Amino acid sequence: HKTGNPNPNVVVTLSNPGLLDCPICFEPLTVPVFQCDQNGHLACSSCCTKIKNICPSCSCPIGSNRCSAMEKVVESSTTSCRNKKYGCTTPVTYNKKNEHERTCKYSPTCSCPYLGCKFVSSTMELYLHYINDHGDSAIEFVSDNFFTITLKKYNKSIVLRERDVSTLFILHNNVDALGNVVSLSCIQPIFKEGFMYNLVARHRGSDSVKLRSVTQSIRSLQGYPRPRSLLLIPQEFFSSDSNDGQLEMDVRVHMA
Ligand SMILES: [Zn+2]
Ligand SMILES: [Zn+2]
Ligand SMILES: [Zn+2]
Ligand SMILES: [Zn+2]
């Protein structure tokens, strides 16, 4: 047994971090990396096209010779995600850093839950944006008190907002075989603790189903993971006098 590298995890510090960037466009180098035929000047593949395969430093051809040594360096250089302080421990290769950070689940920013809106920001800014741009489409509530909402059977999500913590909540509602499956989540970074909440759905005042759980933290409506627990509301709870059945539901979110 023979190993070429006695210390496979050796940490190297570059005194010039720009060495891993394309010297022409300054973006992180990605494979393939090209070098000019005479002097080994580097360029990324998109720059080779832009400079019409003529090296800007020495005017010799570039675009047919790859620099495999640099490709190996680029592929094996790992760095940490900028969300490390929020709990992300994923080592990312330098050239995939931007790509990873765009979708990193530890990111402190959240996406607007309004259909089609692309706004992304911190929880507080998102709350203000929602009020300014989407007006009354969220139901305002006060924490620690029960409030009643009307849940339509086929309405997949309802946006709720709490003023004191300037935070948006989502009531998720999905039609399932036995009834509707309902849960509450909070739009906030996933490293933040959830809020205790209660849901109560009644049927003609006598039967009721209840849930007491903790909100799941989600950064966008798309990235909704499986909730910790959910409320199953039987089919017959929804009024049958219209095609689009609905019911009244009591909700309470605890801030303390
Ligand atoms: Zn480039
Ligand atoms: Zn050159
Ligand atoms: Zn990350
Ligand atoms: Zn929006």
Image: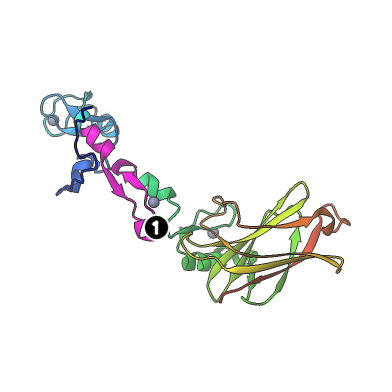
User: Residue at the spot x=19%, y=34% of the render?
Assistant: 5
Residue 61 vs 218, above or below: the answer is above
SS for callout 1: loop
Residue 54 vs 184, above or below: the answer is above
User: Residue at the spot x=59%, y=53% of the render?
Assistant: 115
User: Picture coordinates of residue 211 (x, y %)?
Assistant: 70, 64
User: Picture coordinates of residue 58 (x, y %)?
Assistant: 11, 30
In the image, taking residue 206 as reference, residue 136 lies left or right, namely left
Location of residue 47 by image quarter: top left
User: Residue at the spot x=81%, y=53% of the render?
Assistant: 235
Question: Residue 140 in magenta?
Answer: no
Question: Residue 78 in magenta?
Answer: yes
**Range covered by the magenta-colored residues:** 70-97
Q: Residue furthest right?
A: 241
User: Residue at the spot x=60%, y=69% of the render?
Assistant: 196
User: Picture coordinates of residue 114 (x, y %)?
Assistant: 58, 57
The quadrant the N terminus occupies is: top left
